[in-house]
Image: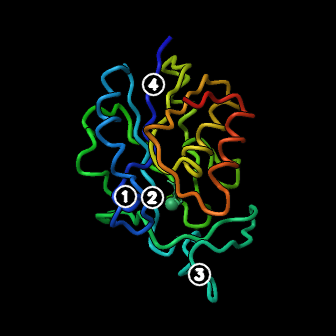
Amino acid sequence: MTQALIVIDVQNDFCPGGALAVPEGDLIVPGINALMAEFSAVILTQDWHPAGHSSFASEHPCKEPMEMTEMPYGPQVLWPDHCIQGSIGAQFHPDLTVDRADLILRKGFNRAIDSYSAFFENDRQTPTGLEGYLKTRGITRLTMVGLATDFCVNYSAVDAAKLGFVVTVRQDLCRAIDFGGSLAAAQAGMTDAGVTLA
Ligand code: VGL
Ligand code: ZN
């Protein structure tokens, strides 16, 4: 039984000073680095959007960041431009121990579809390949940490539980965007899906 630590989107744009800053997003970095020592497998995810990504409010005339829009695949929050491929904002926080990672999984590179989850894009159908990677390595238990609790951590944790992984989210090593009740909804959704909130 192999356990993996999945570190979600600990990138400059999600930390204070970044384009989509999560309050206290940087404070979790030392604890995540320390936790890596307890796992035989460490996987990092990296939000990785092309310029002009369809989830950016700047691509939608008359829309502001944090407003909703309707995409062919369903409702989508519109974000400030963030985590653009090759930008400083898309880089991992400089203090994150990137060298411990076995795999860096990039997501959100498809211009037409956002991808909160590390497993499926926001159409809920297009796989990222992470399920196959983990299962072929014999990994059955996942601990998730990172940013943001209510979006990418939430979607990743719920998908993982649905795929049959045993999932724990270390909330002390996550931080939330939390707008419009998104954190409470995410916590309820994760609990319903069988995710352990620690
Ligand atoms: C995220 C919004 C847009 C996240 C990524 O990592 O939670 N949120 N892109
Ligand atoms: Zn994004």
Residues at marks 4 and 3, CA–CA distance in whole angstroms: 38 Å
Question: What kind of element bears circle 3?
Answer: loop
Number of the label disc, if any, that sits on residue 64 = 3
Question: What kind of element bears circle 2?
Answer: loop
Q: Nearer the viewer, residue 163 or 30?
A: 30
Residues at marks 2 and 4, CA–CA distance in whole angstroms: 24 Å
Q: Residue at x 72, y 41 (%)?
A: 189
Q: Are marks 4 and 3 in contact (CB under 8 Å)?
A: no
- Residue occupied by mark 4: 4
Q: How is the image coloured?
A: rainbow
Q: Earlier in the sequence, mark 4 or mark 1?
A: 4
Residues at marks 3 and 1, CA–CA distance in whole angstroms: 21 Å
Q: Earlier in the sequence, mark 2 or mark 3?
A: 2
Classify 10 Å Cα crowding around label 2: few (below 14), some (14-19), many (20 and above). Answer: many
Residues at marks 2 and 1, CA–CA distance in whole angstroms: 6 Å
Ligand 1 within 8 angstroms of badge 2 C-beta: yes
- Residue occupied by mark 1: 15
Q: What amino acid is found at the position of numbered circle 3 in the picture?
A: Glu
Residue 45 image-quadrant placement: top left
- Residue occupied by mark 2: 22
Q: What amino acid is found at the position of numbered circle 2 in the picture?
A: Val
Question: Residue 127 in the image: x percent, y percent?
Answer: 62, 43
Residue 140 image-quadrant placement: top right
Number of the label disc, if any, that sits on residue 107 = none
Q: Are marks 2 and 1 in contact (CB under 8 Å)?
A: yes
Q: Residue at x 53, y 58 (%)?
A: 177
